[in-house]
Image: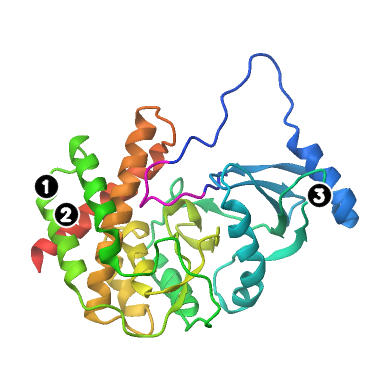
């Protein structure tokens, strides 16, 4: 199972998987984790440690059967994202209907490792970019999750890194993504894509309270079992803002024909302006996913070939439904 964190509305990040060295190698991280646990959480030090995934911000190591250790890795921002999860996920998790990682222990910076680290619960399931949701009932699970999450956030809730704010602020990103995708031959009708975006940007702004957002609902952060969603991971981009940011998810995550089922199940029902903005967020996410998938097909740094097909399917649905309006 792989777990990666990346924002597909940005350029592909550097490949998180290091080049293999010549000859046999031993990964030093498991022994480092054991040493950290012995020093700070000795009751957990005897549990087996094995790799879960190497993501863009953190390495994820399974700890026994039910826990995981998240170690900040490649990015300077990883520390703050991890501490945000530690602060807020214990508050939010009890009200969410899908399984999510719940922080159990916080590791303090030390001479062994100069950054904070986290012990969380392990969430079983397969990432949706590898095992997509295939049943229409997946719409009900996603709608229940977002209905529960999208509650008014307190004033001290974290702000997003370009998520949950006015969609027009991402116009430069959209133009760059569309140009890159068109130049790569990934978008057969750029005008249709731009029409969806322009309609979304023209929609009335969100005037309701800032609600809790996951902020990063791409296929690798949703877990599936038997064709439906069973868990949601990586809340590093948890923030407060316009729910349209998260409501892009049905277009990218659900099988054909299930988006409207999601909209019927989501509560409170989104108004027309919010759905228009959500389509813009979905276009932005789909273009980013297509570029990451294209990079993966060609073996380029940061590429993930499994991200391409769901993103392309989402863009096709978005432009097709726009044409029928």
Q: Which residue is mark 2?
A: 193
Taking the spot 84% from the left edge, 50% from the top edge, the residue there is: 37
Picture quadrant where residue 139 is located: bottom left
x%, y% of residue 240? 46, 74
- Which image quarter holds the N terminus? top right
Helix, strand or loop at disc 2? helix
Task: Return the residue nearer the eye: 191 or 78.
Answer: 78
Q: Which residue is mark 3?
A: 110
Comes first in the chain, label 1 or label 3: 3
Is disc 1 in contact with disc 2, using a CB cutoff of under 8 Å? Answer: yes
From the viewer's perspective, is the residue at label 3 or at label 2 nearer?
Answer: 3
Q: Residues within 10 Å of mark 3 (few under 14, many from 20)?
A: few
In magenta segment, residue 11 = yes
Taking the spot 63% from the left edge, 54% from the top edge, the residue there is: 79
Q: Which residue is mark 1?
A: 189
* 108 sits to left or right of 228: right
* 270 sits to left or right of 22: left
Q: Residues within 10 Å of mark 1 (few under 14, many from 20)?
A: few
x%, y% of residue 4? 52, 47
- Which image quarter holds the C terminus? bottom left
* Marks 1/3: CA–CA distance: 54 Å
Q: Which residues are magenta?
A: 5-12
* 158 sits to left or right of 272: right
* Above or below for 279 versus 78: below
Taking the spot 50% from the left edge, 81% from the top edge, the residue there is: 153
């Amino acid at each position: 199972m792989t777990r990666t964190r990346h924002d597909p509305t940005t350029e592909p990040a550097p490949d998180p998987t290091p080049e293999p060295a010549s000859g046999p190698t031993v990964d030093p991280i498991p022994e480092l984790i054991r040493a950290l646990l012995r020093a700070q959480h000795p009751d957990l030090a005897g549990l087996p440690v094995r790799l879960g995934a190497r993501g863009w911000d953190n390495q994820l190591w399974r700890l026994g059967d039910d826990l995981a250790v998240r170690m900040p890795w490649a990015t300077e921002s990883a520390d703050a994202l991890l501490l945000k999860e530690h602060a807020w996920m214990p508050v939010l998790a009890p009200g969410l209907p899908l399984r999510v990682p719940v922080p159990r222990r916080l590791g303090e910076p030390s001479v062994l490792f100069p950054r904070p680290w986290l012990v969380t619960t392990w969430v079983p399931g397969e990432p949706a970019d590898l095992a997509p949701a295939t049943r229409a009932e997946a719409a009900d699970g996603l709608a229940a999750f977002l209905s529960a999450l999208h509650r008014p956030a307190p004033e001290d809730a974290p702000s997003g890194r370009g998520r949950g704010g006015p969609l027009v602020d991402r116009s430069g990103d959209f133009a760059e993504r569309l140009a890159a995708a068109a130049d790569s031959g990934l978008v057969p009708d750029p005008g249709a894509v731009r029409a969806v975006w322009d309609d979304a940007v023209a929609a009335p702004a969100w005037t309701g309270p800032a609600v809790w957002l996951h902020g990063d609902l791409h296929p690798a952060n949703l877990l599936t079992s038997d064709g439906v969603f069973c868990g949601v991971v990586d809340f590093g981009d948890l923030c407060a803002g316009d729910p349209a940011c998260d409501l892009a998810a049905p277009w990218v995550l659900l099988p054909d024909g299930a988006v409207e089922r999601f909209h019927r199940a989501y509560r409170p029902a989104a108004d027309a302006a919010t759905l228009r903005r959500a389509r813009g967020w979905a276009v932005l996410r789909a273009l980013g996913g297509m570029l990451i998938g294209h990079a993966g097909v060609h073996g380029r740094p940061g590429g993930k070939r499994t991200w391409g097909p769901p993103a392309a399917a989402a863009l096709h649905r978005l432009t097709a439904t726009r044409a029928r309006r």
